[in-house]
Image (tube, rainbow, N blue to C red):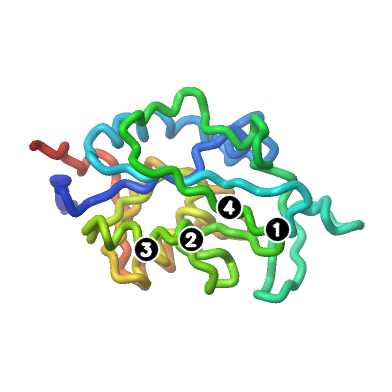
């Protein structure tokens, strides 16, 4: 039996990277990524507090395959902080691909957090760059606002949502992933690996239908 969640003042919705480049037609399209936008709009209406993340890379970013002669997207390299997947150029600062989708409509969002702007470090998580040390400041923001439970939705389930949920849990927040409001890239079984990780940490993956609107 799945619990229902009534959203309160200590809950926040983290909407991850609903950007043109991550949707069909974009340079790093998550399959069917556009399908979740209407659901996220509806879901966000249940939350008085919403944070949006935006991937925001400079040109020539370390994570781009084009920055490494002879390398192709989805190959890996070793960098100072470990193994790095190489991606097509995506979400380059100021480009149409980096913009939020036009059909994303969450006018009451209180914070837009940009990540991935350090040229030499990739950033999946909304909380930390991929060196696992460089903080974005989101932890402090959420704590100072008094939030204790973080619901997550967006793109992609097995990368930026995964790392954000893991870090939210690690920082002491209760993390809940709204699974039908996410889509996966699924590189080498990464979607199943994400589900295994969440089970091991006790991070719940639930449908949007269990969320009840905050009243007050």
In this view, 209 is above or below 173:
above
Secondary element type, mark 3: helix
- Do the numbered discs 4 and 1 sit on residues whose CB atoms are within 8 Å? no
Distance of label 1 from label 3 (alpha carbons): 22 Å
Q: In terms of sequence position, does the residue under pointer 3 or pointer 4 come before the other? A: 3
Q: Residue furthest right?
A: 70
Q: On the image, numbered disc 3 is attached to which residue? A: 139
Quarter of the C terminus within the rendering: top left
- Alpha carbon of mark 4 to alpha carbon of mark 1: how far? 25 Å
Alpha carbon distance from label 2 to label 1: 14 Å
- Numbered label attached to residue 186: 4
At horizontal 56% and vertical 59% (from top left) the residue drawn is: 190
Count up the numbered dots.
4
Choose mark 3 or mark 4, whichever is in front: 3
Which residue is located at x 35 percent, y 70 percent? Answer: 171
With respect to residue 49, does 145 lie above or below? below
Disc 4 on helix, strand or loop?
loop
Residue placed under numbered mark 2 in the picture = 136
Q: Residue at x 54, y 69 (%)?
A: 134
x then y, percent, for residue 156 = 52, 48
Say which of marks 4 and 1 sits in front: 1
Q: Are marks 3 and 2 in contact (CB under 8 Å)?
A: no
Q: Is residue 1 above or below residue 91?
A: below
């Amino acid at each position: 039996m799945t619990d229902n969640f009534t959203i309160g003042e200590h809950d926040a919705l983290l909407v991850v990277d609903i950007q043109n480049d991550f949707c069909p037609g974009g340079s790093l399209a998550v399959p069917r990524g556009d399908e979740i936008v209407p659901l996220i709009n509806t879901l966000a209406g249940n939350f008085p507090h919403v944070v949006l993340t935006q991937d925001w890379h400079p040109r020539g970013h370390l994570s781009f395959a084009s920055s490494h002669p002879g390398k192709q997207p989805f190959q890996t390299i070793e960098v100072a902080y470990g193994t790095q997947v190489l991606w097509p150029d995506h979400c380059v600062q100021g480009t149409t691909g980096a913009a939020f989708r036009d059909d994303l409509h969450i006018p009451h969002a209180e914070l837009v957090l940009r990540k991935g702007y350090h040229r030499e470090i990739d950033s999946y998580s909304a909380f930390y760059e991929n060196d696992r040390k460089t903080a974005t400041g989101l932890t402090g923001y959420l704590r100072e606002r008094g939030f204790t439970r973080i619901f997550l939705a967006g793109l992609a389930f097995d990368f930026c949502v995964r790392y954000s949920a893991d870090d939210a849990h690690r920082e002491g927040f209760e993390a809940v992933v709204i699974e039908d409001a996410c889509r996966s890239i699924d590189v080498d079984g990464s979607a199943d690996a994400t589900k295994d990780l969440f089970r091991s940490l006790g991070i719940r993956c639930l449908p949007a239908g269990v969320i009840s609107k905050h009243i007050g």
